[in-house]
Amino acid sequence: MALDVAASVLHRTHPGTWPLVGVVTTAAALAAGLRGVPWGAVRAEERAYAAVATIVAGSWLAAATAMGPGHAPLHAILIVAMVALGVPWWTHRRRRAHVRVDRVIHAWPDLADRIGLDGSRIMSAVVDTWGWRARMKLSPGQSVTDVVARVPAIESALGTRPGAVRVEQDPAHAGRFTMRVLAVDPHAGAIPWPGPTVRSLADPIDLGVFEDATTVRVPLLRRHALIGGTTDSGKSGVLNVVLGNLAACTDVVLWGIDLKGGMELRPWAPCLARLATTPEEATRLLADAVAVLDARAQASGRDNTRVWEPTPDAPALVIVIDEYAELADTAPAAVPYAESVARRGRALAVDLLAATQRPTQKAMGGGALRSQMSVRVCLRVRERRDVDLILDKGMLAAGWHAHTLDAPGKFYVLADGHNQPRRARAYLVTDENVRETAARYTDHRPDLDPLSRAAIDHQPRAIASPPPMAIDPELELLTALDEAPDEGLTIPQLIEATGMRRTWVYDRLQALAAAGRARQVSRGRWRA
């Protein structure tokens, strides 16, 4: 195309310059054949190819300048030359990629000894668009956890960029895994949102794209979801993807809680049946959700049905909470209601979708609510321990390295069907996308069923403070140790946190230390 355009311009403006084009072509071909300039060719066959390609391109350009690119059969010659010269170039690049992988296969035994994976071997390797992947076998006694801990050493041994190696467990064999080496980051650029892909909550929602170009599909029906990540990690983007799809569903009523004055959720207000922006409104909203739960539970008991099947006439209820930690701090009376929804809401199609920067056990109501979240989306975090806070204990050691994510919108997802640490990138939802989607579906939003509306209408307007939740001293001790500063907590501080006697605290600390879950930082001071 470049040659065709250049020939058209030269033929119209300077048709007599074709001899000059020929001279320049000859000089460029000599430079390419003798020194590999300017194509960077090093080997003899590469220089010969560069010289031939230069001569063919320059000769065609000189002829087209003199006669015009539309002169027969110049266009046919250009297409034939493009194919004839393109095939060797493509084959050569593929061969060089295979040669690099073959070198790694032959050198792997020595590399494995250096990085502490002695005895491991490469069973097979395949070159793909972004790099290459290999099926690996470990020596007896080694596990994928050992490999994950040595990923930085593998990257150093292979000479790749940091973050280029991926390790995935083989679900059929504990001693095998797949190693992917990415020469190019497939998620280097943002991925535009294609728009809503579902019309019912029963359909899985597309959140984004994995590194192998497969779609991240997450089911949300009868599931609570947690989205966690540090500031500027892309939480709002993931939340907008979910809301954009739920707004298109005709069997979902959306409620929102945004205690930052509605800054995040207000653009979706046309599709939200209710939006709470103050602690009092948030408490009222969650209390009404519990009333809906109770009414649906009684109806299900009378009808002898185990689950509430969402329909446009009897839709599901999804409560979206932006920054749950803010709710726990400013509206503590709302927390027991949220926990009640988390414990009982799934079967009755009353689901929670919570986003937060750091879901500590204290912020998430002692862990009772977080434990009910079966869908976890973990974006970039600042500290390594935050990976286990968002996903679950032990996930960091298993390879879910969210602290290494290097761009907004990159995430790991832990849900049904997504149990491997695979990196993904969420779709980019622009402000214009939000406005268009909200305006498009605002007239198609369903209303709550009569049973749920009646339950809310019969709720007393003055909300009494719910009874305090029973405190689990074991959980309070673990929470205090997890959140202890580097210098640890003293025994009196742990007694105050748990409400238990000194002997009980000492006994539990010794048991946790023996299990490797607590350690004594200094005399009388402990932490996880």
Image (cartoon, grey):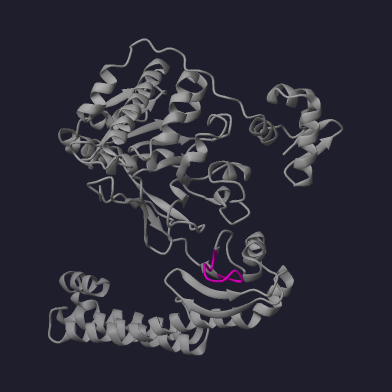
From this viewpoint, is residue 230 visible? no
Judged from this view, the residue extending furthest toward the right is 523
Q: Is residue 295 left or right of residue 75?
A: right
35 part of magenta stretch:
no
Magenta stretch prevailing secondary structure: loop
Could you tell me if residue 246 is visible in this image? yes
Left or right: 269 as drawn, with respect to 354: left
x and y, in percent, of residue 370 in the image: 51, 37
- Above or below: residue 59 compared with residue 488: below
- Quarter of the picture containing the C terminus is top right
On the rendered structure, is 301 left or right of 520?
A: left
Q: Nearer the viewer, residue 314 or 237?
A: 314
**Numbered range of the magenta stretch:** 168-177
**Along the viewing direction, whichever of 395 and 507 lies nearer the viewer:** 507
Where's residue 472, x and y in %?
62, 29
**Extreme top residue here?**
462
Residue 390: image quadrant is: top right
Q: Nearer the viewer, residue 54 or 317?
A: 317
| Residue at 71 percent of width and 68 percent of height | 115
Instruction: Please give left or right for residue 60 compared with residue 140 in the image.
Output: left
Picture residue at 27% right of the left edge, 86% below the top: 81
- In the image, residue 344 lies at what x, y percent? 41, 35
Q: Residue at x 45, y 56 (%)?
A: 418
Q: Observer-nearest residue: 322 or 220?
A: 220
How many marks the image carries: the answer is: 0
* Percent x, y of residue 353: 40, 37
What is the quadrant of the N terminus in the image? bottom left
Q: Name the residue rendered at 52%, 50% in the picture.
A: 405
Q: Against 193, is 105 above or below?
A: below
Would you identify the image quadrant in which residue 210 lies? bottom left
